[in-house]
Image: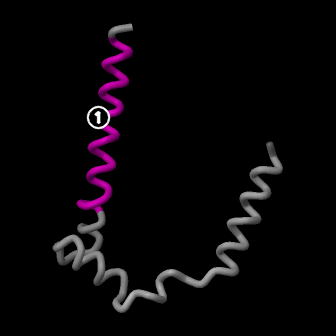
């Protein structure tokens, strides 16, 4: 099993070493892309509200269902 982790690590290292950066194809910086995409002038707030908010909501739902299931068992 250990060899799978070593092979995956080597493959990831080679991918990062050999493949070009995907950010080179963007005509504008990533911060401007986030601001444009979210519609919020602050990039950090845009990331938090668009991505982390949904993640937190779904985590609360999953934990609520798990606690609900434990209370009936």
The chosen color scheme is one colour
- Mark 1 is surrounded, within 10 Å at the Cα level, by few (under 14), some (14 to 19) or many (20 or more) other residues, namely few
Residue at image point 27% right, 74% down = 43
Q: Position of residue 7 (x, y in %)?
A: 78, 58
Badge 1 element: helix
Q: Which image quarter holds the N terminus?
A: top right
Residue at image point 36% right, 87% down = 29
Pick the front one: 30 or 41:
30
Above or below residue 35? Residue 65 is above
Q: Residue furthest bottom?
A: 27
Q: Position of residue 52 (x, y in %)?
A: 32, 55
Name the residue tied to disc 1.
Answer: 61
Residue at image point 31% right, 19% down = 68
Q: Is residue 15 left or right of residue 35?
A: right
Above or below residue 10? Residue 30 is below
Q: Which residues are magenta?
A: 48-71
Name which quarter of the figure residue 37 lies in.
Answer: bottom left
Q: Position of residue 47 (x, y in %)?
A: 30, 66
Q: Is residue 46 left or right of residue 62?
A: left
Main SS of residues in magenta:
helix
Per the image, is 45 magenta?
A: no
Q: Is residue 63 left or right of residue 13?
A: left
Above or below residue 69? Residue 40 is below
Pick the front one: 50 or 42:
50
Q: Which image quarter holds the C terminus?
A: top left
Per the image, is 49 magenta?
A: yes
């Amino acid at each position: 099993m250990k060899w799978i982790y070593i092979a995956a690590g080597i493959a990831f290292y080679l991918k990062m070493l050999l493949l070009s950066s995907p950010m080179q194809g963007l005509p504008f910086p990533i911060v401007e892309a986030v601001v444009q995409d979210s519609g919020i002038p602050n990039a950090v707030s845009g990331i938090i509200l668009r991505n982390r908010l949904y993640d937190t909501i779904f985590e609360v739902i999953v934990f609520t269902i798990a606690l609900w299931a434990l209370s009936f068992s």
